[in-house]
Image: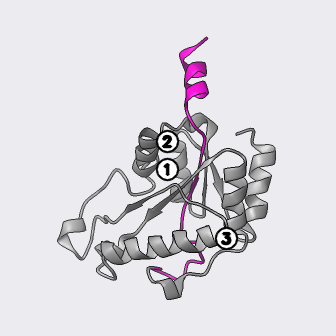
Amino acid sequence: MTARHQRSDLGRRAAFFDRDGVINIDHGYVHTAEQLEFVAGAAAALRTCRDAGFLIFIVTNQSGIARGYYDEDALKRFHQHLCAELAAHDARVDDIRYCPHLEDAAIPAYRQACACRKPAPGMILDLAQTWSIDLTRSFMVGDKTSDMVAAAAAGVQGYQFHGGNLHDFVEAILKGSGV
C-alpha cells in the first residue's frame, strides 16, 4: 500500500465554501445579522455535503476589518448568527477561517501580505491540518478566481459558482466529480 493510499484511508473529506456570494448574498462587507440573506439552496447544499460524509468549512477574506468598516468581534458575532441560522435549517458548519489582513489596510495592525488571504491557500491548509483532511478527496466552492487559485494551491478541486441555486450546483459536483 502506498503512502498516498494510506493517507486517503486516514484523512477525512471536506467541502470548503467561500462565504460572500456563495453561502450568503454579497451585499458588500456583510457583517450584521440584518444583512444576512442566504443564497438559494445554501442550507440544503451544506446538508447534502454532510449527508455525503464531508466536513463543512467556510474560508473567507474579510478585508472590511482591515478597512475599519467593522471589527473582529462584530465578525465573530455575525458568524455565530450565520451558523445558528444554518443550524435552524439542519445545516451545520464545522469550522470557519477568515483573513482580516490587507496590504494597504487603513488599520496598521492588519496591514500585511498574508499567507491566509486568498488567493493564498493558508486558510484551507490550516483547516486541513487541524481537522486531518485529505485534500485530494475534498473540494472547494467559491465565486471568484482567487478562490479557485487558493483551492489549486492547496491541492483541492475548485468549482466556481456563478450564482443560482447552490444546492443544485453542489449536487452536480457530488454526482460528477468523483470526490
Residue situated in front as seen by the camera: 49 or 160: 49
SS under mark 3: loop
Spatial CA span between label 2 and label 3: 30 Å
Horizontal and vertical percent position of residue 47: 69, 59
Q: Position of residue 156 (x, y in %)?
A: 57, 42
Task: Give whichever of discs 3 and 1 has the lower sequence position.
Answer: 3
Q: Residue 75, relative to residue 112: is it above or below?
A: below
Instruction: Tell me how far mark 1 sits from mark 2, CA to CA.
Output: 6 Å
Q: Disc number at residue 89?
A: 3
Frontmost residue, 152 versus 53: 53
Q: What residue is shown with label 2?
A: 154
Asked whether 2 falls inside the magenta stretch, the response is: yes
Residue at x 29%, y 57% (from the top left corner) = 113
Residue closest to the eye, 34 or 119? 34
Residues packed near mark 1 inside 10 Å, few (<14), some (14 to 19) or many (20 plus)? many
Q: Quadrant of the N terminus?
A: top right
Query: In the rendering, at what x and y percent does residue 39 appear?
Result: 66, 74
Q: Which residues are magenta?
A: 1-30
